[in-house]
Amino acid sequence: MLRYALMRVVGAIPTLFLVVLVAFIMVRAAPGGPFDTDRVLPAEVAANIERAYHLDEPLPQQFRRYLTGVLRGDFGPSFRYSDYSVAELIRGALPVSVKLGVLAMALALCAGISAGLVAALRRNTLTDRVVSAIAMTGVSVPVIVIAPLLVLFFAVQLGWLPAGWSSSGGGSRWIMPIIALALPQIGFIARITRSSMIEVLESEFIRTARAQGLATATIVRYHAMKPALLPLLSYLGPAIAGIVTGAIVVEQIFGIPGLGRLFVQGAQNRDFTLVLGLVILYATVIILLNLVVDLLYGVLDPRVRRT
């Protein structure tokens, strides 16, 4: 198990380095700069600004300087928010995004697994068809469409929930963003759980358990649940990536002061260091959580550790 874990950790390091390198090159290759304004700055002023932020150095030297700072936990100063460093901006927005992502993932797992189990146990019935249709709808409709529809129905027409993020919204302001972020993952999880559970229920050891007179609930709980959820565990990596990327859209639509909205503002303002810091943070989180999923899969399925 230790060898398996070390192989996964070692494999994650070059992936993260490649993400940092590609993100740095793409950000610097984008047209415009962080200090471009409607008023043309004098050449001496522009040169002094570039010198202060080391933008006058060759690109390889800039990357080496930036990478050295990242290894120390320093993402540099924000080019647009002059009184803040990138690390300070991330620390301020991180708790909101973490809460949104955790709650959306919890909802997706609870609702998706429950719906998939119900559909599998009532295979080829009306319930199965309804659950499959809802799951397909959730998979097909993107977050950028789901979120405005929720606002139109629950906020504008019914007036039940606040349309955006406000300090007076209380707990109700979380409801629509969490639902919008979780719905696509609910569809994926429900479909995976359904197909996996159907396959497990047709296995030899399940037929043996039924021949022994065990109740269906007992068979599902003690015999079928664990092997049926193994494929779902392998999907948690892509699911987490979907939650992270979907949060950028959801936070922008609902005006949530999280990392996603900060990322959009940084891109619009051409704030190089802010965009790079958020890309590195997102990549690190996704890589680490995928690593955790791989390790959990290795714990639950010994066959994986032998590969």
Image (cartoon, rainbow, N blue to C red):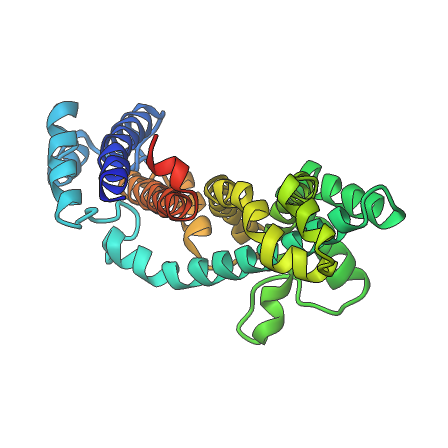
Q: Residue furthest right?
A: 126
Q: Is residue 260 left or right of residue 12?
A: right
Q: Residue at x 23, y 32 (%)?
A: 17
| In this rendering, position of residue 22 left or right of residue 245 | left
Please provide percent x and percent y for residue 223. Answer: 60, 53
13, 21: nearer the viewer: 13
Residue 70 locus on image (x, y percent)? 17, 43
> Which is nearer the eye, 243 or 261?
243
**Residue closest to the eye, 43 or 33:** 33
Expressed as whole percent of the image width and height from the top left, the position of residue 165 reads: 56, 64
Image quarter of residue 298: top left
Q: Position of residue 291 (x, y in %)?
A: 34, 43
Looking at the image, residue 283 sits to the left or right of residue 249; the answer is: left
Q: Find the residue positioned furthest to the front.
A: 212
| Figure label count | 0
Q: Quadrant of the C terminus?
A: top left
Name the residue located 23 percent from the left edge and 44 percent from the top edge: 2
Residue 151, quarter of the rendered image? bottom right
| Front-most of residues 91 and 121 | 121
Asked if residue 230 lies left or right of residue 293, the reply is right
